[in-house]
Image (cartoon, rainbow, N blue to C red):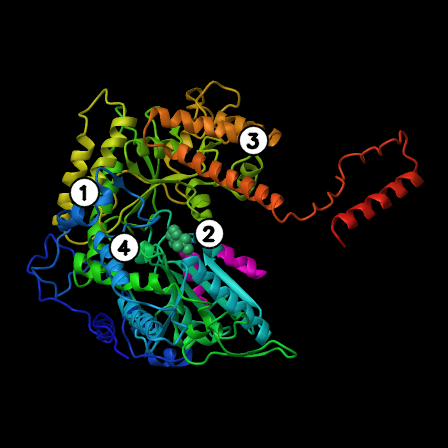
């Protein structure tokens, strides 16, 4: 079979273990080129026991591990890229950004034009079949998938002899695959699963706890450190199977968590086998993830490629081969994962042999998307240099610092800060080993009242600035940074607050944040646009020079660029768990139900009142929803069609005012379309192959319907009526 040249190229590239490196740079002062998030190289290991013996001493292990994102590599070169270089190719490669300021790279980053062009030309020029078939086009597709799998492992510094990569839909699917396999392994070996996770975990990691009764949420790094130092006390017991999961980077604050935990857990837990799952979805988007040391690498890594390259929408579960046996007893099988199945008169099957991915990738792989991944890596290297993630880490760290400093410097004329920033005490913007290029904040007016986070998102959106707001699928982060207790959260829910339909401010406190996240193709101009927007819209400019804060932030950023090493954090004390911002404490006063204030904004009259928290009465806060939402909800309960009309009216109003529909209008639009679709679907179904309607069980709350023609219901006549009803229902169901 003739294999096309580009596929041979891919195979060739993937077997080249050394990443291309250029010669050295003489400009250390203003160029902090960051290196990989390292699981440091050491002797390779095949099992946990070998891993332990391969480490000669504790101190070697402790010091062998580095998370060195900041040091200047000796092999950097004058031709290495500068952060400003992004501006040179941004218009050409990211034309979708023209006139727009995209600041939601944590949601998804953006794909380059070259990636789409090269991918489409690949598909147009070549004939690919389903990799499960045996024809030449299918064999080519299969070979190519394998080559890309290997290349992707090398992208993360993972040796294909030591790691396997399972293609999945996204990071969430990777996480789910791990726990599904754990459950099956636990059932097969009669070992219950214990699950531990860090409070900064994304919802997709939190949900894993539902698979077991034994779970623990670690509320701080310190708690994890103590747990590790104690050899796992308070974790899984003997004859239990442990899984500890945490995000490499918080998707809320952008804080980067220690990568050393995985190796240390493997080394020091002897009572019960405890495996580690690193959720690298947020971390890998702007940091180089290096799995070159199997001894200290996580057992399992989950990630989504659209967060790194913008496209394709595929994810991966990277598995350390020494730990893959835990995933190997998965019960479910789908097409492509079995070699033989008997389904008639017997139930026997044989799973595919060989690499783990053969047994875990159910059905046809998204092979076209996997080809796009190949182009994505090539284009990334072309745009961002031979070590693209290194450059991106450096570039975004600088911009993140600029953003943080700028937000910190924005002050009202009375000197009060415009933004309450949620930042961990240990995080330092500009130091990529501790902090990614994400800032979570809320906007506070000069009088101390808070602006609803959705309002900020909508106001930004109207100016073509795109940020994310809400609770961001980070329940632990929201609770700790915003100071919500479990009972308050339950009460907020009872009062009608929902992640998807939030009450933005309850009890004088925000229920979410505004999140700005930067990516590879972000520029200083993007940061400036955001700062100017916040300054123009929310700062009272009665005193002071307009734009002064932004100019000062830029000046500071230049100074930082010229200095080496991380700097202490800025003078303003940002909010962090256990450190409620001062203006919260002094203004955490009651937003009095029934007052005339704007919904979602703390009333001025409440300022400076008793700093002690008033009693929380959830029902009182229902009135603080947006009035149209309340109206819609009520109308929808009464008559679903009216509810839709209100949404449509709102949409029409919004579009007549503004040719670009706002976030709110778009959300309406989506729900209207979904509702109509559901209705349409139901109607279609009833018209065509309608099933008889199911009998509706009588409500336990309502008195039984009076029988036709029977005024007072005697017990006997009631029973005979029920029997007749039952017969009717059985007939209607065709039984
Ligand atoms: C840290 C983290 N984990 C998990 C996820 C879930 O990723 P996906 O939706 O691609 O499955 C995200 C998404 O934003 C994330 O930021």
Q: Which residue is mark 2?
A: 203
Q: Which residue is mark 4?
A: 286
Q: CA distance from mark 4 to mark 1?
A: 16 Å
Viewer-proximal residue among 149 and 504: 149
> Within the magenta stretch, is there residue 290?
no
Q: CA distance from mark 4 to mark 3?
A: 46 Å
Residue found at x 29% / y 32%: 417
Q: Earlier in the sequence, mark 4 or mark 3?
A: 4
Indicate left or right for 45 with 125 as reference: right
Residue 397 location (% of width, % of height) = 23, 51
Number of callouts: 4
- Name the front one of labels 4 and 3: 3
Residue 460 location (% of width, % of height) = 31, 33
How many residues crowd mark 3 within 10 Å: few (<14), some (14–19), many (20+)?
A: some
Q: Earlier in the sequence, mark 1 or mark 3?
A: 1
- Please say if the residues under marks 2 and 1 sit with CB atoms less than 8 Å apart: no
Residue 512 can be seen in this image: yes
Q: In the image, is residue 559 above or below residue 178?
A: above
Specify the segment rendered in magenta.
207-231
Q: Which residue is mark 1?
A: 524
- Name the front one of labels 2 and 3: 3
Q: CA distance from mark 2 to mark 1?
A: 31 Å
Residue 721 location (% of width, % of height) = 87, 41
Q: Which residue is mark 3?
A: 641
How many residues crowd mark 2 within 10 Å: few (<14), some (14–19), many (20+)?
A: some
Q: Quadrant of residue 482?
A: top left
């Amino acid at each position: 079979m003739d294999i096309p040249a580009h596929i041979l190229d891919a195979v060739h590239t993937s077997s080249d273990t050394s990443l291309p490196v250029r010669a050295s740079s003489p400009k250390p002062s203003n160029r902090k080129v960051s290196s990989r998030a390292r699981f440091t190289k050491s002797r390779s290991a095949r099992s946990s026991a070998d891993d332990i013996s391969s480490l000669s001493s504790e101190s070697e292990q402790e010091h062998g591990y580095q998370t060195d994102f900041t040091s200047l590599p000796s092999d950097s070169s004058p031709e290495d890229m500068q952060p400003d270089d992004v501006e040179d190719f941004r218009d050409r490669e990211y034309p979708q950004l023209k006139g727009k300021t995209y600041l939601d790279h944590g949601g998804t980053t953006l794909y380059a034009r070259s990636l789409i062009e090269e991918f489409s030309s690949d598909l147009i020029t070549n004939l690919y079949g389903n990799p499960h078939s045996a024809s030449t086009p299918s064999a080519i597709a299969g070979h190519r998938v394998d080559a890309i799998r290997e290349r992707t492992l090398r992208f993360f510094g993972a040796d294909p002899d030591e790691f396997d990569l399972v293609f999945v839909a996204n990071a969430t699917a990777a996480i789910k695959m791990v726990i599904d396999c754990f459950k099956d392994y636990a059932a097969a070996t009669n070992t219950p699963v214990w699950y531990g996770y860090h409070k900064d975990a994304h919802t997709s990691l939190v949900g894993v706890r539902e698979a077991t009764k034994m779970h623990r949420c670690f509320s701080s790094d310190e708690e994890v450190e103590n747990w590790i130092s104690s050899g796992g006390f308070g974790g899984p017991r003997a004859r239990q199977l442990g899984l500890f999961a945490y995000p490499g980077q918080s998707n809320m604050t952008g804080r980067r968590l220690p990568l050393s935990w995985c190796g240390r857990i493997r080394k020091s837990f002897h009572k019960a086998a405890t495996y580690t799952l690193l959720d690298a979805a947020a971390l890998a988007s702007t940091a180089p993830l290096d799995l070159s040391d199997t001894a200290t690498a996580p057992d399992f890594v989950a990630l989504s490629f659209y967060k790194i390259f913008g496209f394709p929408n595929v994810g991966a579960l990277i598995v350390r081969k020494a730990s893959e046996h835990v995933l190997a007893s998965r019960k479910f099988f789908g097409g492509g994962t079995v070699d033989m199945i008997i389904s008639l008169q017997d139930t026997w099957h044989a799973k595919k042999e060989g690499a783990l991915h053969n047994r875990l990738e159910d059905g046809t792989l998204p092979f076209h998307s996997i080809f796009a991944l190949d182009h994505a890596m090539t284009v990334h290297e072309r745009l961002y240099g031979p070590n693209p993630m290194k450059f991106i880490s450096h570039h975004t760290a600088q911009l993140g610092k600029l953003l943080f400093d700028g937000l910190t410097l924005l002050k009202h004329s009375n000197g009060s800060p415009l933004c309450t920033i949620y930042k961990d005490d240990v995080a330092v913007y500009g130091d990529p080993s501790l902090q990614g290029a994400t800032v979570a904040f809320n906007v506070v007016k000069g009088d101390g009242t808070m602006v609803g986070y959705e309002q900020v998102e909508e106001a930004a959106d109207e100016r073509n600035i795109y940020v994310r707001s809400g609770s961001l699928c980070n329940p632990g982060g929201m609770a700790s940074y915003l100071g919500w207790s479990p009972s308050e959260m339950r009460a907020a829910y009872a009062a009608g607050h929902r992640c998807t339909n939030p009450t933005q401010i309850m009890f004088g406190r925000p229920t979410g944040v505004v999140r700005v996240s930067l990516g590879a193709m972000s520029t200083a101009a993007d940061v400036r646009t955001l700062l100017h927007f916040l300054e123009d819209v929310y700062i009272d400019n009665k005193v002071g020079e307009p734009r002064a804060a932004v100019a000062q932030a830029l000046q500071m950023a230049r100074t930082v660029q010229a200095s080496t090493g991380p700097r202490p954090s800025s003078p303003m004390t940002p909010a962090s768990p256990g450190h409620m911002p001062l203006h919260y404490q002094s203004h955490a006063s009651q937003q009095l139900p029934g007052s005339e204030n704007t919904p979602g904004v703390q009333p001025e009259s409440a300022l400076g009142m008793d700093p002690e928290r008033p009693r929380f009465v959830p029902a009182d806060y229902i009135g603080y929803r947006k009035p149209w939402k309340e109206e819609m909800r009520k109308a929808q309960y009464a008559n679903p069609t009216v509810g839709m009309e209100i949404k449509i009216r709102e949409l029409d109003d919004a579009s007549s005012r503004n040719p670009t529909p706002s976030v709110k209008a778009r959300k309406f639009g989506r729900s209207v379309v979904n509702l109509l679709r559901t209705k349409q679907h139901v109607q279609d179904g009833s018209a065509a192959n309608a099933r008889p309607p199911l009998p509706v069980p009588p409500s336990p709350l309502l008195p039984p319907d009076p029988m036709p023609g029977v005024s007072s219901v005697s017990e006997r006549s009631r029973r005979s009526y029920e029997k007749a009803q039952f017969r009717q229902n059985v007939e209607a169901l065709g039984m």
